[in-house]
Image (tube, helix red, strand yellow):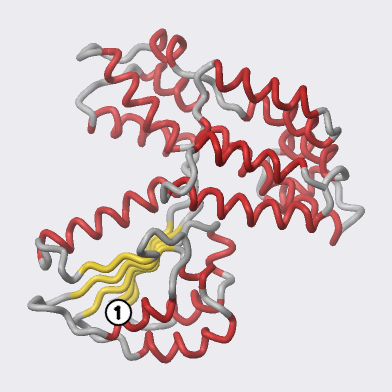
Amino acid sequence: MMILVYGDDTFRVQEKVQELISAFVKKFDPGKLNLSLFPSGGSDKVDMDDAARTIACAPFLSERRMVVIRDGFRSLKKNQEGTWEERLLKTGDSTIVIFWESTSIKDVEKHPLYKIISEKSGVYTYVFPLLQHKELISWISKCVQKYGSTIEVKAQELLALKTGSDLWQLNGEIQKLVGYADGKNISRFMVETLVHAQFSDQIFAFLDAVSQQRIIDAMQLLEEERLSGASDGYLFNMLTRQVRILLELKACLEEHPTLSKDKAASLLNLHPFVVSKTISQVKAFPLEHLKKTHDYFYELDRGMKTGRYSERMGMDLAIVALLQP
């Protein structure tokens, strides 16, 4: 059996993978003797040959074995694709393979291994796009209930407005609000008092400063966000999102130089305001620099999630990379 879990909403992607692992352990493997996670051994890259050998092994004193491969698509070399197709076709019914991908839906679905997996029978796919406003409100309500509290409708609306679709931040803010409310209904006033607005409110000013090499101004904006309570993990996620938008817009305009702002917004599925604010910054960043920076941000993200870097160090390294020509 193969399971593919991916999407732009990395919070729900991780949540689903953990749910699948917990169900497997409870039903088949309480001792976790047949659960293998890749990457392993403190590495932040998957040894795909090692993963393939593990998949080929029979379960030990159990009906099933589970192999979880995180971001294997990125770790797979071009000359390994054919070999992996053969290996996957030979996967026995006793082995459950989970491909856990953290890259965007677009990047996953254009990968050669995605085609190989999706065309195989008996594959389960879970895709998690970013939640839209109504879905986000519903998620907030359920999350608050999960933590044993309640929340006013107006408070839900304001919370969604302040955090956007970043469920990593939103989950943390809800836990903070539940603790503060101490059994009371979470009010709009509590959200106004405790929840910091998105760094995206300042992201354009920050990148303006970076693009113009106004390093002191850029660092001052960053420190203001830190002092106001924003975590470095949250700031990093916001910066990564904006670099991705810059990269997509830069590539789009290089391919279609005469494209209008409205058409670019429609083509990239972005709000016209975001395109309007970003388009003035695009000229300052070469396409290759944006590609290199985007890939490096991915490695930093992996490093922070595996404990290789602290969130503060990851954010500082991200800024250094962005400032380099």
Residue 237 visible to the viewer = no
Q: Is residue 187 above or below residue 275?
A: above
- Residue occupied by mark 1: 54
* Residue 125 percent across, percent down from the top left: 38, 66
Q: Give the camera-side residue of 228 and 161.
A: 228
Q: Residue at x 43, y 58 (%)?
A: 127
304 on left or right of 153: right
Q: Residues within 10 Å of mark 1 (few under 14, many from 20)?
A: some
- Identify which amino acid the numbered label 1 is placed on: Thr
Q: Quadrant of the N terminus?
A: bottom left
Instruction: Give the image quarter of residue 107.
Output: bottom right
Q: How many marks?
A: 1
Q: Is residue 20 above or below residue 215?
A: below
Give the secondary structure at mark 1.
helix
Q: Is residue 174 above or below residue 289?
A: above
Q: Residue at x 38, y 88 (%)?
A: 87
Q: Give the camera-side residue of 325 and 7.
A: 325
